[in-house]
Amino acid sequence: MAALWSIPAVQTATWAFVKVMIILNGMLGVVSYLIYAERKICGHIQARTGPNRVGPFGLLQPIADVLKLLFKEEFIPANANKVIFHIAPILAVFPAVVTFSVIPMGPPPMFVATDINVGLLLFLAMSSLGVYAITLGGWSSNNKYALLGGLRSSAQMISYELAMGLSTIPVLLRSGTLSLVGIVENQAGWYALGRTPLALPNWGIFHWYLILPFVIFLITAFAETNRAPFDLPEAEGELVAGFHTEYSSMKWALFFLGEYMNMIVISSIAVTLFLGGWHGPGLMFGANGWLSEGPPWMGLVWYLIKLGALMFFFIWVRWTFPRLRYDQLMGFGWKVLLPAAVVNVLIASVWLFVRGGM
Amino acid sequence: MVAALFFGFAALLVVTSLMVVLHKNPVTSALFLVLAFCSLAGIYLMLRAEFLGMVQIVVYAGAIMVLFLFVIMYLNLQHDVETGLQIAVRRGLGWFVGALLLLAGGALLKRGWALGPANDELPGAEQGNVASVGRVLYSRYLFPFEITSILLLVAMVGVIVIARGRTRHTAREGGAA
C-alpha cells in the first residue's frame, strides 16, 4: 500500500478524485440550499415569509422538494424523440460541472482542482455547449412552445456569448495569461490611487478600464443562464414554460440543477476575473498586519463571500426587474453591449500599451 | 497513459464519424458530428495544441453545429426525397473521395507515425501555445488573417442584403394586394 502510494501518478489521481467528489457533492448541496435561499429572498422581497413549514425556518424544504420530484411520474410525450429527450437534461448539467474543474476556490494547490493554461477558453467552450441542452430539449419534446423556447434560447445565448467573450479580453490584456490561477495571482496586493495615500485592492474591478467589462460580463451572465430579466426561453406568459414544458420529475429537476449550477459557475468566473478571486485582507493580527494575506483557508472564505454576494445579486435582480421583450433583448445585445465591449477593448489596449504594461 | 488516451479519443472519433454517415436521422447525425469534434479537440490537446483544441469546441461544436442543427430542425427532414440517379452520383463521389483519403492515409502511415508531436521542440512550449499562435498570427500571417476577416465580413453583408431584399419584395407585394 505504501509502495503504491509513493507513485506520484497514484497520488495525483487520488487527490483529483477526492477533489472531484467534494466539488460534485458540494455543488449538489449548495444548489438545493441556493433554491431555498432564492425562495426565502423572493418571499421577503414580495413581503411574504417564504418556505417556513418543513423544519426550523423551513430549512428542510429542499429535501422535501427533492423527494417529491423523485417520486413524481416521469412523462414522455407521444412522438417525442426519446433518446434525445433523455440526453438533453444531462447536457444541461455537464458543462457546468466540467467548468468547475478549473475554477480556483482558494490558493493553489489546496483549493484548485486543476490549473490548465487555457482555463478561460475552457469556460467559454463549455458555456457555448450549454446551448445544446435547451435547443435539443425543446426540439425533442415535439411541442411547439418547447421548440419556440429552445430556438429563442439558442439565439439569445449565441448573441450574448460574443459580448461575454469580448468583455473578458481587457482582463487577459492585463494579466497576460489564460490560466484562471494566473489571472487571480495577477490581482494580488494593493495599489495606490495616483499620488494619494489611498490604497485599493489590486482587483480587476478597481481598475477603471475593467469596470465596464465587469458590468457587461454580469449582464451577459444573466442572458447566458437564462435568468430574469432575460428569461425569454421560459416566458410563461407566451410559451407556457418554454423548453421544459414537457419535462417532469427528475428530468425537469436536472434542467433546474443545470440553471443553478451555471449561475454558480458564471459567478465564480466573475469573481475570478474581476473581484480578485481568493484575495482579500487576512484579518489576522500577525507579524504582517491584518491587511496582508491570511492562511489558505482564509482565501476560501473570501472566495465564498464574494460568490455569495454575486449569487444574492442574481436573485435580487430576478425579483426586481420585469422581463424584456424579445426584440429589446436582441437589440440590446447587438447594438449596445457588443459595440461597448469592442470600444472598451480598444481603450484598454491603448491605455495598457501607453502605460507600458504590455 | 498517453497512448491509452490517444487510442480512446481516436476510437471515439472513428466511431462517431461513422455514425454521422450511417445514421438515418439527420439530427442524430449532427449530434454525432458534435461528439466527433469534441474527440478531435481531445486529440489536439494531446498534441499540445491546447488553443486549437478549445477553439475547435468553441467554434465548431458550439457555434457552427448549433446553426446546422437549426437548419435541420427547420427543414424537418424525415426521408430521402431525392431520386435514384442523384443518390448514385453522390455515392460515386463519396467512394472516390473516400478512396483518395484512404490512399493519403496509407502514404502517411508508410512514412512512419508517432504519438504526440513530431518534434518535441515546439516553439513557445513553455509559455503555452496561445501566445505563440497569437504572435505568429499577427506578424507572419497578418495578411491572410486580415483577408479572411474581410471575406467573412463580405459574406455577412451579403447575407443581410439578400435577406433584406426579400422582405422588401414581399412587403411591396403585400401592399399591392
Image (cartoon, helix red, strand yellow):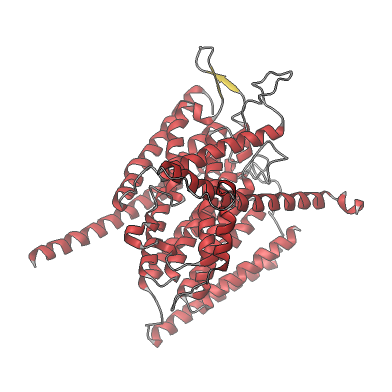
Q: Nearer the viewer, residue A198 or B65?
A: A198
Look at the picture and state if A196 lies above or below A154: above
| A291 horizontally vs A18: left or right | left
**x, y (%) of residue B172?**
12, 62
Residue drawn at (73%, 40%) of the image: A110
* Left or right, B114 with reference to A121: right
Which one is nearer the viewer's eye here, A155 or A277?
A277
Where A28 falls versus B128 (above or below)?
A: below
Q: Residue at x 41, y 82 (%)?
A: B79
Can the viewer see residue B53 in this picture?
no
* Percent x, y of residue A79: 43, 78
Could you tell me residue A296's position as x and y percent? 71, 33
Give the residue drawn at x 77%, y 52%.
A13
- In the rendered view, does A185 fall on the left or right side of B73? right
Q: Residue at x 62, y 51 (%)?
A: A29
Q: Most extreme residue toward the left, as rendered?
A: B176
Q: Is residue A69 visible?
A: yes
Q: Is residue A125 above or below residue A136?
A: above
